[in-house]
Amino acid sequence: MKKLLSALTAGLFLVGFNQSVQALDVDFVSDLSIESHGVTVGLDQDDNEFTVSAAGVTVSTSDSSQIGVAYSSTLWGITGSASYDYSSADEHLLGFDTTTSLLGVSVDAGVDWNIDAASFDATVGTGYSAFGLDGSATTNWDLDDFGYEGLDLDAGYTWQVTDSFAIRPNVTVPFDEDFARGDLTAGVSISLSWGSSSE
């Protein structure tokens, strides 16, 4: 009898949880990265992105980008990156980004230039990471109209299962320029690594 009651309770909980998730309009998007000998291959359900990275250079393709190339480097604790994308709409996009971190707190700023549309967008964000927990808040801006376009909040927890295997459940909550909440995005990031990065 106890097993039957436990099964019914679990079933009711799952039905209620599923209805709550549907009421919240949650999109489930996960990603996978595999690193070996300094080369990282990534697959992301968000925009169906595929990336290959090595020695600071990343080549990518996705639903919105036919081909993208980015280079990043760190100097004096500041990471800077520059990127070029040829979009699916046949537009040329340039991006520049800087990030700095101290005691688990990071600050980043980026600018994107759509050459064909002659438009500029910017992001400014801050984040934290400690004891496996991480979170960030990123604001989005339209530089052409000097307008605020919204805020993205992200939180996650990295579970380092082994030295070469990590799992990070995460959730992102977007807000528009009127601070109305959009659809939540939840997912799991899986990281696998083996081999020396110096080889």
Image: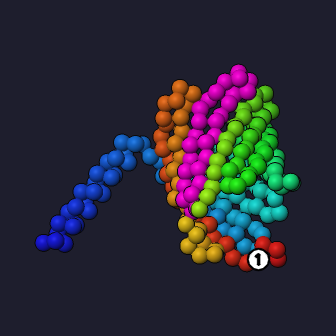
Q: In this view, does 127 lie above or below 36?
A: above
Can residue 18 be seen in this snapshot? yes
**Image quadrant containing the N terminus:** bottom left
- Tag 1: Cα neighbours inside 10 Å, few (<14), some, or many (≥20)? few
Can residue 44 be seen in this snapshot? no
Q: Where is residue 167 in the image (x, y as percent from the top left)?
A: 55, 65
Secondary structure, mark 1, is loop
Q: Is residue 138 magenta?
A: yes
Q: At 33% across and 52% down in the image, what residue appears?
A: 17
Q: Nearer the viewer, residue 121 or 3?
A: 3
Taking 14 as reference, is 162 left or right? right
Q: Where is residue 139 in the image (x, y as percent from the top left)?
A: 64, 36
Extreme residue in the left direction = 1
Q: At 53% across and 46% down in the image, what residue appears?
A: 172
Q: At 52% across and 30% down in the image, what residue appears?
A: 179
Q: Nearer the viewer, residue 85 or 142?
A: 142
Q: Position of residue 143 (x, y in %)?
A: 73, 27
Provide the residue span drawn in magenta.
Answer: 132-158
Q: Nearer the viewer, residue 38 or 62?
A: 38
Q: Main secondary structure of the magenta part?
A: strand
Q: Mark 1 points at which residue?
A: 196
Q: At 80% across and 33% down in the image, what residue appears?
A: 115
Taking 22 as reference, is 31 left or right? right
Extreme residue in the top direction = 145
Q: Quadrant of residue 3?
A: bottom left
Q: Position of residue 44 (x, y in %)?
A: 61, 56
* Colour basis: rainbow
Q: Is residue 169 above or below residue 83?
A: below
Amino acid found under the numbered disc labelled 1: Ser
Q: Is residue 148 magenta?
A: yes
